[in-house]
Amino acid sequence: MFKKLLVANRGEIAVRILRAAKEQGLSTVAVYSEEDAAALHVREADEAVCIGPAESQKSYLRVDGILEAAKKTKADAVHPGYGFLSENAKFAEACEKAKLTFVGPTSKMIDAMGDKVRSRETVAKNKVPTVPGTDGITDLKSAVQQVEKLQKARKDFVYPLLVKAAGGGGGKGMRIVRKPSELKENLERAQSESIKAFNNPMIFVERYIENPRHIEVQVLGDGKTTLHLYERECSLQRRHQKVVEEALSPSLDETTRKKILEAGVRAAESVGYKSAGTVEFIVSEQNDFFFLEMNTRIQVEHPVTEAITGIDLIEQQLNIAQGQKLKIRQSDIVTRGHAIEARLYAEDCDSNFLPQPGPLHFLRFPHWKGVRVDTGVVSPTKISSFYDPMIAKVIAWAPDRESCREKLKLFLGATEIEGLITNKAFLLEILGSKFFQKGRYHTHLLESADWRKTPKPSSKILAAFCLKDYLDNRIDFSATSRSAWQEAYDAVAN
Ligand code: ADP
Ligand code: ADP
Ligand code: MG
């Protein structure tokens, strides 16, 4: 039994885990970078240890630094959250060796699922449908031949294709290939990107599914029993990263749902999974579904599942890590109502979703029944340029989807944020759109411009207009002996 939990993460998920730990009567330790010295997660923990400078590589990604912090504070368990070291099998192994309980699956399970090529083979053995694709490719010399060979062997391995990094994550390292003449160049580029981003030269090629939906199954296992907690629909993405998620999926028919849930459980069972995990699928326009990957950790969008099932996933993770068997049975897990999560980001949706770190002078959420806000910031503060620029996750619950959509829209509308450019208006546009109301959308919808009825000028252009209005009011350009620019400068400076 462990008594003191170190949370090896930052931001909203660190705050979320600390809360669950306190509810179980555990002592808590936070780790932080110099950049995060004043962060909420540091204040929320019983103890906190600085593990290095702002750069993740030198702090949150440093295995030795985190183990040292655990030793120093006599922590006997580690929760990795998501991102950072959460899916790093070597980190889990180092914890195991240091006799620290890793709140998650074993290092072997992470390893088996960590590589997209190997995980596909593992789950396929347990009758989980996978996207037709090649084995792992490291040597590019034979790559084109491998693709051509598979095309002869499998009728369903057809263009367009997608080159992916075997060790990829966070939506990075993927290239679409529309015709054979583009294959060689894309293989080369994908490999060099994969080496740069993931320090891993292995790539693979799979069929590119047009306009798919991303549907994932939440699973919970104790090493013996595997349960599913239904699915989440996460098809609203930008740059392969999720923006709005919901549970249950509005686009699944009952027959496909049943099949996907069973396949999700089988995928987890193929490694005798322990802890909370997510099995990701893409679903084609014809309702065929294929395994994408398994995330062997808690997921950003886990609160929508908690909202409809009433089950606290971090509490379950902690119980399983304490060696307990699951106390719930599949038949106990019933869903109630509908939940939608929106990820509030400091980013400019009119300029390619460029991150907009900077001072956050004011942030205030309303307090409403049925709306949960998970955040790691309290204003005034600064959204750091060193990490993911997420401000908060807002999760609404209501008895039915339409009132849930309406509630989240009203809540976001009543949320006050001052100081930086955010995606709030973009989220409101999504929640108010026809396609979202209908519940029919796919992973490329947000990237196609035509769903936005009135394209807005970019935030930069709007800012320039505001400045011009301001200057027009302040300065009489006709009656000046000095340069207009000098005068404009003085006006703004004063
Ligand atoms: P989720 O479905 O929970 O959003 P993601 O795979 O998108 O899962 O990852 C969760 C978080 O971790 C995101 O902030 C993502 O940017 C980050 N992340 C995941 N894997 C990597 C990776 N290999 N490199 C960099 N960031 C990653
Ligand atoms: P990551 O580890 O970066 O999350 P995934 O394999 O889960 O990588 O893919 C991320 C997203 O990319 C998916 O949600 C989906 O939108 C898109 N994608 C991945 N593979 C395919 C495919 N074969 N066809 C079409 N879209 C895909
Ligand atoms: Mg994924």
Image (spheres, rainbow, N blue to C red):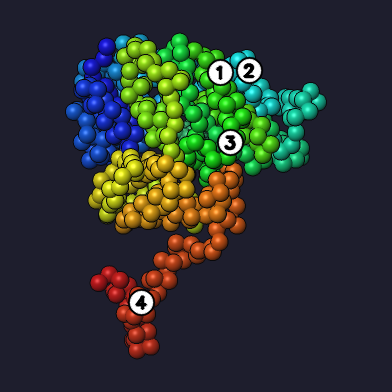
Q: Which residue is mark 1?
A: 266
CA separation, marks 4 and 1? 65 Å
Q: Where, quadrant-wise, is the C terminus in this rendering? A: bottom left
Query: Is residue 472 toward the left or the right of residue 430 in the image?
Result: left
Q: Residue at position x 22%, y 40% from top?
A: 38
Whether residue 205 is visible, yes or no, is no
Q: Which residue is mark 3?
A: 252
Nearer the observer, 383 or 241 = 241
Q: Is residue 432 above or below residue 187?
A: below
Nearer the observer, 312 or 79 = 312
**Secondary structure beneath disc 2?**
loop
Q: Is residue 61 above or below residue 452?
A: above
Query: Is residue 231 toward the left or the right of residue 491 in the image?
Result: right
Q: Residue at position x 36%, y 51% from top?
A: 411
- Residue type marked 2: Lys
Q: Are marks 1 and 3 in contact (CB under 8 Å)?
A: no
**Secondary structure beneath disc 1?**
helix
Q: Earlier in the sequence, mark 3 or mark 4?
A: 3
- Residue type marked 3: Leu
**Secondary structure beneath disc 3?**
loop
Q: Is residue 176 above or below residue 462?
A: above
- Residue type marked 1: Arg
Q: Which residue is mark 4?
A: 471
Q: Residues within 10 Å of mark 4 (few under 14, many from 20)?
A: some
Name of the residue lying farthest toward the right: 152
Q: Position of residue 439 (x, y in %)?
A: 55, 45
Q: Is residue 267 above or below residue 52?
A: above
Query: Is residue 485 toward the left or the right of residue 116 in the image?
Result: left
- Cβ at disc 4 under 8 Å from ligand 1: no
CA separation, marks 1 and 3? 19 Å
**Secondary structure beneath disc 4?**
helix
